Amino acid sequence: MAESTGLRQFFILLYKGLLLRKRHYIVTFFEIIVPILIASIPCIIKSEAPSTMDAPPENPHWINQTIYAAFDPFTTMSNSFYNDKNLDFLYAPANDLTSPFMNDSIAMFKSKTNFQGQLTPKGFKTEEEMVNYYIHQKGDDFDYLTIGTVLNNFQDRFPKSLVYKIRYGGGHIGPKFSTDMKYRVNGPHTDNEYRDSYFLAWQSAVEEMFIQKKATEHGKVTELKNFKIWMRTFPYPQRSDTKLIVKLGNNAPLVLNYAYLIFVMNMVRRIIEEKANRSKELLKMMGMTNFTYWASIFANYFVCGFITIFFIAILYKIPMKNGAVFVNSMDFLLLIIVLVLFMVNLILFCMALSVFFNQATFGVTALLLIYVPSVSLLAANFFYEEESQTKYFLLPGAYKVAICLIPQGALLTAFSVISAYEAGGEGVQWNNLTEFLIAPNMNMLRILLIMLLSCLIYIAIIWYFDAVWPWQPGVP
């Protein structure tokens, strides 16, 4: 081999891999057939669903804008989770003007709402004291709801205008208000913890009490008889139905990631075993270069992986029972590109991981500890439910890029975009690669570019650490 060209060495190593696959034909069978069978499960499930659940491409199910009726901010659901909780009203600053004002506001709150728990006011000199009290006394007690109110410019007389701040301390409830987005993800929702947690009721009580105080001050109490505050939820604009997102965007990439579990485990095991039994060292002594070795490893597994990817793409595009097509509208070539980039990422990821281990047991264990939790946690936290999709929407752009740098996260993100376009009946096409659909800083083109970037990162890791890793045995 020492006198052979690099290309000849490459083909010799490919032939060696072919002989190993022929010898271990059962393992090869599982590497090819199992991913295809597992990946077909969502297709079979969709084909068994009623055909009315699937929107035809020419009818994307556009829904008109949603207009909400006005409501009384003091009313909440009769069976609200918060009705029988104890409610602490913390406020600052506590003085001769703010304390009676808070007591009157609490009395109005109690008379106009259906709250059944105990109401307890407590004043503090400063906002900092109020926050410290909540953190150390009430923060871990979920039997209590806590609403903090900071009143500004309340010195020796009522100010001309009400300037105040409400700090809701509802434990795990606060982040679910979803008030930091103009529109809720995946269409309007009937649940409204911002309203049912008494936040709006307390806000209305404070403002109505201030209006009453100012009216009394100016002798205009009689004009308040017909005064009433009403609120209305912000209208939701025209939208396309997103009912396919749960079926496609969540299940397909999750199943596809787990379908290749045997494939990646066997790849890492074989690469590390060749290093452990000195086969790689022997090949180096015969003149083989690192580039030739890693290129042959990649080509060997890419051929096997491409076969599975090609058949999976066909499964996603062919009509099945009831005429259901799993990925109905997406361009077939783009689907192939997404799946091929995922496969390239996955192979390079496993190759890079194998560089750091000399024992197959440790390498496979590390792979499982990284691969399985990353798939499950990313899907559960950012892609599976409506609340988790909201978390992904609010993530900074750098976090979304980091998710796409690993093959599992890139596939989950790509299918979330694919599913959103499929739900609208348009599908991912070459002319909408740059459109921002699921998030303001992530589209399909960026996902593909990040996947290419991650390939370069894994190649750099393989090249560098395979050359300088200090405790690696054998010929440098």
Image (cartoon, helix red, strand yellow):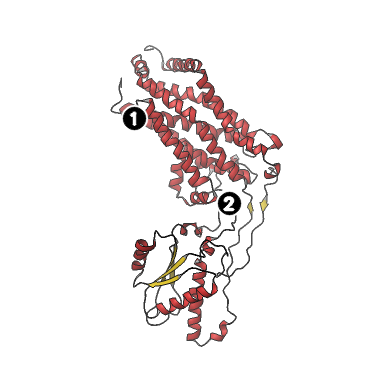
Q: Nearer the viewer, residue 195 or 397?
A: 195
In the image, residue 41 lies at what x, y percent?
A: 60, 34
Q: Tell me the residue that label 2 is attached to.
A: 186
Residue drawn where x is 43% and y is 63% of the image: 169
The numbered mark at residue 465 is: 1
Name the quadrant of the N terminus.
top left
In the image, residue 406 lies at what x, y percent?
A: 45, 37
Residue drawn where x is 41% and y is 60% of the image: 141
Instruction: Give the quarter of the image for residue 119.
Output: bottom left
On screen, residue 73 versus residue 462, left or right, reads right
The answer to which of marks 1 and 2 sits earlier in the sequence is 2
Instruction: Give the quarter of the image for residue 459.
Output: top left
In the image, residue 155 lies at what x, y percent?
A: 37, 79
Kind of residue at disc 1: Phe
Q: Is residue 12 among the parts visible in the rendering?
A: yes
On screen, residue 95 versus residue 35, left or right, reads left
Q: Tell me if mark 1 has few (under 14), some (14-19) or many (20+) residues whose alpha carbon lies within 10 angstroms of its own.
A: some
Disc 1 from disc 2: Cα separation: 44 Å
Q: Tell me if mark 2 has few (under 14), some (14-19) or many (20+) residues whose alpha carbon lies within 10 angstroms of its own.
A: some
Which residue is most to the bottom?
219
Which residue is most to the left?
470
